[in-house]
Image (cartoon, rainbow, N blue to C red):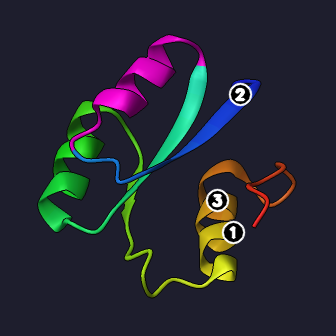
Amino acid sequence: MNQHTALVLFAGSGGLSRGLHEEGFDALGLDVDPLCVEDHRKIAGPCEWGDLMTMQPHELRDLWSKHFGADHPGPTL
């Protein structure tokens, strides 16, 4: 795991996540469009489906823990 991590909201097909990865970040994408999630996973790595209009803060923390581990400092919500 890299020293730097990022939660990429509205991740789309993964351009930002891929760029972050190339600069040494571990990035987790989040998007509401299932086709974008699928493309993101192929192009840039981990991505989850999620609707920010309905998600609760604990759901974001759970996704973070799933990908980066429960001990990794997550986003402050």
Q: CA distance from mark 3 to mark 2?
A: 13 Å
Q: Residue furthest left?
A: 35
**Residue type indicated by callout 1:** Arg
x and y percent of residue 65 in the render?
A: 70, 61
Q: Is residue 61 magenta?
A: no
| Residue lying at 52% horizontally and 37% vertically, measured from the top left | 27
Badge 1 density bin: few <14, some 14–19, many ≥20, Cα 10 Å: some
**Side (left or right) of 14 relative to 28:** left
Badge 2 is on which residue? 4
**Residue type indicated by callout 2:** His
Label 2: element kind: strand
Label 3: element kind: helix
| Residue lying at 21% horizontally and 42% vertically, measured from the top left | 13
Q: Which mark is residue 61?
A: 1
**Predominant secondary structure in magenta?**
helix
Q: Which mark is residue 76?
A: none
x and y percent of residue 46 in the render?
A: 41, 47
Badge 3 is on which residue? 64
Start and end of the magenta stretch? 13-24
**Residue type indicated by callout 3:** Trp
| The quarter of the displayed image where residue 64 is located | bottom right
Question: Marks 1 and 3: CB-CB under 8 Å?
Answer: yes
| Residue lying at 71% horizontally and 27% vertically, measured from the top left | 4
Label 1: element kind: helix
